[in-house]
Every structure is written in structure tokens, then in C-alpha cells.
């Protein structure tokens, strides 16, 4: 007897990049509203990935005083990762999406997200757009631009609407 429901093994994976920005949380909510909550039986498993900066990338110096600063930075980075992931889990819970996987991986978000796509055999990567102009994008680098060229899956860049005054 054939069944129309999708089993756990048949579900595709969506990887959603999260960070401590409103853009990221908007992209997560958009994904939940438009891709996961529209179906009676969602066809996707959701993996939330937070790329945690390394201590060395957060502290631009090494030398006298570094030994005292590094543990403080480490605690702050862990605290931020916990806050971001708990916020994302709460958004999912509010939308009644309980079956999620949350990963915190140290590294550059561009690499971390592309590696997560490979690891989970994702069919889609969702990232928010910070809306940087050309100059900021050139200086800071765009995670969404990088992922759109390097991730081995469909990449959806969710832009937060600009509110007109």
C-alpha cells in the first residue's frame, strides 16, 4: 500500500545560517512561514548553523596581556553563541517547529555554511542579507554572495524589507 506521507529518511534538508543580526532571524522566520509551515507534512528537516568566531580572529593582537584577555573573549563568544541559538530555537518553538538540529561551529561563516551543506547533504541553504552596499560588501565580504557561488545546493537569500518612513 502506497502512502502519501514523506518519511524521515526521504525528507530533504534545509540549512539555515543564523547569527546575532535581525536579518538572520528574519530569514529564519521567513523560512519557517513559507517553507516549513505551509505543508501539512513538511518535506524538510531544518538544521540551524551558527558560525562562531574563533578567539584568535576576535582578538587582533598577541603579546603582553593577551593571556588575560583570551579567556574573557572565549567566555563572551560562548555566551553570544548560546544567546543566538536559544533565540533561534525559541522562534522555532513559537512557530511549532520542534524537529530541528542546531550546530555551533567555529570558523568563518562562509566556510562553515558551505561545509554544513556538504555534511547534511542539504538541498537548500537559507541566509539573510545584511543589505550592505558595494563598498561594505567589498571590505567585509558577503557571506550570502560567497555561499551563492560555492554551496553545492540551492541558496536562498532572504532580504528583510525596508520600512518606508
Image (spheres, rainbow, N blue to C red):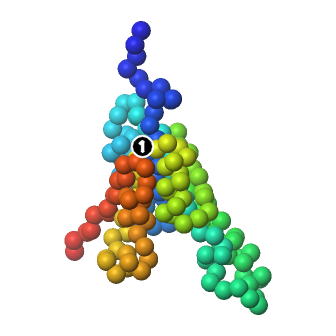
Determine the secondary structure under disc 1.
Answer: loop
Question: Quadrant location of the C terminus?
Answer: bottom left
- On the question of residue 130 being in view, the answer is yes
Using the image, determine if residue 5 lies above or below residue 125.
Answer: above
Q: Residue at x 53, y 54 (%)?
A: 115
Q: Residue at x 49, y 42 (%)?
A: 121
Task: Kindly indicate the quadrant of the structure image that contains residue 139.
Answer: bottom left
Q: Residues within 10 Å of mark 1 (few under 14, many from 20)?
A: some
According to the image, label 1 marks what residue?
123
Q: Position of residue 113 (x, y in %)?
A: 50, 56
Q: Position of residue 143 (x, y in %)?
A: 43, 65
Q: Position of residue 60 (x, y in %)?
A: 62, 84
Residue lying furthest top = 1
Using the image, determine if residue 65 lies above or below residue 161.
Answer: below
Q: Residue at x 52, y 39 (%)?
A: 99
Residue lying furthest bottom = 64
Question: Quadrant location of the N terminus?
Answer: top left
Q: Residue at x 31, y 77 (%)?
A: 134
Task: Kindly indicate the quadrant of the structure image that contains residue 82.
Answer: bottom right
Residue lying furthest left = 164
Q: Position of residue 110 (x, y in %)?
A: 48, 63
Residue 67 versus residue 118: which sits nearer the camera?
118
Residue 54 versus residue 72: which sits nearer the camera?
54
Residue 132 versus residue 82: which sits nearer the camera?
132
Amino acid at each position: 500500500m502506497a502512502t502519501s506521507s514523506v518519511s524521515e529518511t526521504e525528507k530533504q534538508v534545509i540549512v539555515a545560517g543564523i547569527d546575532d543580526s535581525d536579518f538572520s532571524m528574519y530569514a529564519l522566520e521567513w523560512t519557517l512561514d513559507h517553507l516549513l509551515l505551509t505543508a501539512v507534512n513538511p518535506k524538510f528537516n531544518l538544521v540551524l548553523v551558527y558560525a562562531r568566531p574563533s578567539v584568535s580572529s576576535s582578538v587582533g593582537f598577541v603579546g603582553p596581556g593577551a593571556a588575560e584577555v583570551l579567556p574573557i573573549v572565549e567566555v563572551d563568544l560562548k555566551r553570544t553563541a548560546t544567546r543566538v541559538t536559544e533565540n533561534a530555537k525559541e522562534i522555532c518553538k513559537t512557530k511549532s517547529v520542534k524537529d530541528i538540529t542546531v550546530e555551533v561551529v567555529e570558523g568563518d561563516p562562509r566556510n562553515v555554511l558551505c561545509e554544513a551543506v556538504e555534511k547534511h547533504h542539504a538541498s537548500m541553504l537559507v541566509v539573510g542579507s545584511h543589505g550592505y552596499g558595494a563598498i561594505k560588501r567589498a571590505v567585509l565580504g558577503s557571506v550570502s554572495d560567497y555561499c551563492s557561488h560555492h554551496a553545492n545546493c540551492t541558496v536562498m537569500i532572504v532580504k528583510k524589507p525596508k520600512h518606508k518612513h
